[in-house]
Image (cartoon, helix red, strand yellow):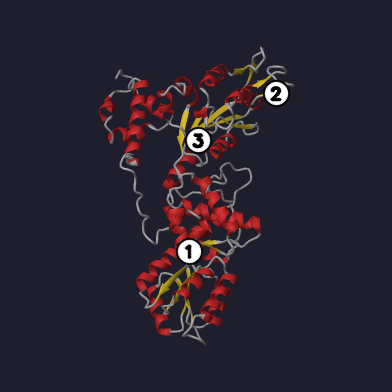
Amino acid sequence: MMAEMRAQPDQPPAAEHPADDHLAAGRACLLLVDDDPAILRQLKWSFDRYEVLTATDRASALRLVRAHRPAVVSLDLGLPPAPAGATVGLALLQEIMTVAPTTKVIVVSGSEDRADARAAIAQGAWDFYQKPIDAGALGLIVERAFHVARLEAETRGLRPVAGQPLAGLITDDAGMLAVARMVERVAPTPVSVLLLGESGTGKELLARGLHELSQRATGPFVAINCAAIPETLLESELFGHEKGAFTGASQQVKGKIELAHGGTLFLDEIGDMPVALQAKLLRFVEQRQIERLGGRVPIDVDVRIVCATHQPLAVRIAEGRFRQDLLYRLAGLTIELPPLRARGDDVTLLAQHFADAQAAKQGKPPPRFAADALTALRAHPWPGNVRELANVVQRAVILGNGAMIGAAELGLGTFLAVASGPAPEPILPAALPVPALKLVREQAEQRAVAAAIRHAQGNLTHAAKLLGISRPTLYTILRRSELEAQATIEPGAAP
């Protein structure tokens, strides 16, 4: 999974896209193209906070684009020698997209023919504005175009540095940056770490970062997904086996734990490990010794253990599906990763990163996201998180046939229908009432918290560890739930 921290060289390389130089230096360059000098004067005055260039015809506009590579262009389609039509303006648009493919072109037209708008968007225009011009409304579109241009320029500027852990972590989100700082502080210590988060949030990437920042970085990093291997094979995969231990065991095989000696063992989806095997894992964690299947000689193993799960471990413990004593041993420190939907503009940063990477693999120019695609990206809940986003964007680049990715190419289903309003609510059978999802989540949360407090005998610090959350987060849950009275119990006191 991609990680998300900015790793920049001491001396940043020159921008591959000249428009990025303007943005990096704070010179937001805006080109206004219109055949009416009065409109240009008015707009230039309205946009005095930018470095404004003006052009009244196709030739001069193209010269300015080549010389200055403006980040944003406002282009009137009605240009001489045919100001009544859109032919000259559309031809100029195509030339701008060829010369400066990352430039955001806002097409302005006095024609009521929507075919012009469709043709402009198809050729790569970022947005479309209908005359008469309202400087305030156009200003909002221009400001948004510059914002997206800056985000794209930042994404293009991300250069993973060889040998630096977490070099692929791309984020502007305070929560994710705090997680990265926590990883940096914890990595040099020998403490076992439990990573919590939904599937696709990048838990394995952080586990690798913990390893690469630790004193075991020169040792092996061995990962195993406890949910991906059948129960009958998982024990052999973890502990290995001797020749003849079972039918088909024709030779001695070292297990993942033994192979990780001197390094880091990453147990992914630990919450799905069978209970019977948890007891054997607990013995290893406590004694740091294993016995291969069919073997009788204990083998000393020196590893740092990092675990991850998307399962609510407090619920699994209450259900008898996970050992509480094992959790105590594994969760020396718990780090919770936020889901993508809670990370603000990270979705657009990551989308552009994945699009650029896929386009480079195919030898294509870097594509851009149309306004409706950006809206769809922000509206989608991303249940699969960063992994889902990467797959969606890569598919859009592979199947797309232009420099612009629209909402339709993303294929995000009902979340693309933002322009046509919400989809009609389905009619549910009266005999099958469906409770509100928010209520179900709140009830499940309260049950899990109650179970954790009972198991921890009122000790809120231990309860938070059982739940895999921080103590302040537990207090927040208690304050908004019916369990608030139990929060008055002093840590360590009987309930």
Provide the residue designation for mark 1: 26
Q: Is residue 247 above or below residue 129?
A: above
Residue type at mark 1? Gly
Work out whether 255 lies above or below 442: above
**What secondary structure is found at the residue carrying circle 3?**
helix
Rendered position, 252 above or below 438: above
Q: How far apart, in angstroms, are the residues tagged by discs 1 and 3?
A: 34 Å
Residue 425, image x, y percentages: 35, 51
User: Which amino acid does the dot numbered 2 rest on?
Assistant: Val
Q: Write down the residue under mark 2.
A: 253
For marks 1 and 2, the one nearer the N-term is 1
Kindly tell me whether residue 341 is visible in this rendering.
yes
Label 1 or label 3, whichever comes before in sequence order: 1
Q: Which residue is the site of mark 3?
A: 185
**Disc 1 packing (10 Å; few <14; some 14–19; many ≥20):** few
Q: Is residue 229 above or below residue 436?
A: above
> Residue 449 at x, y = what percent?
35, 29
Q: Earlier in the sequence, mark 2 or mark 3?
A: 3
Please identify the residue farthest to the left as the structure is shown: 485
The answer to which image quadrant residue 472 occupies is: top left
Of badges 2 and 3, the one in the foreground is 2
Q: Residue furthest top?
A: 296
Residue at the bottom extreme?
Answer: 81
Tell me: 288 left or right of 134. Answer: right
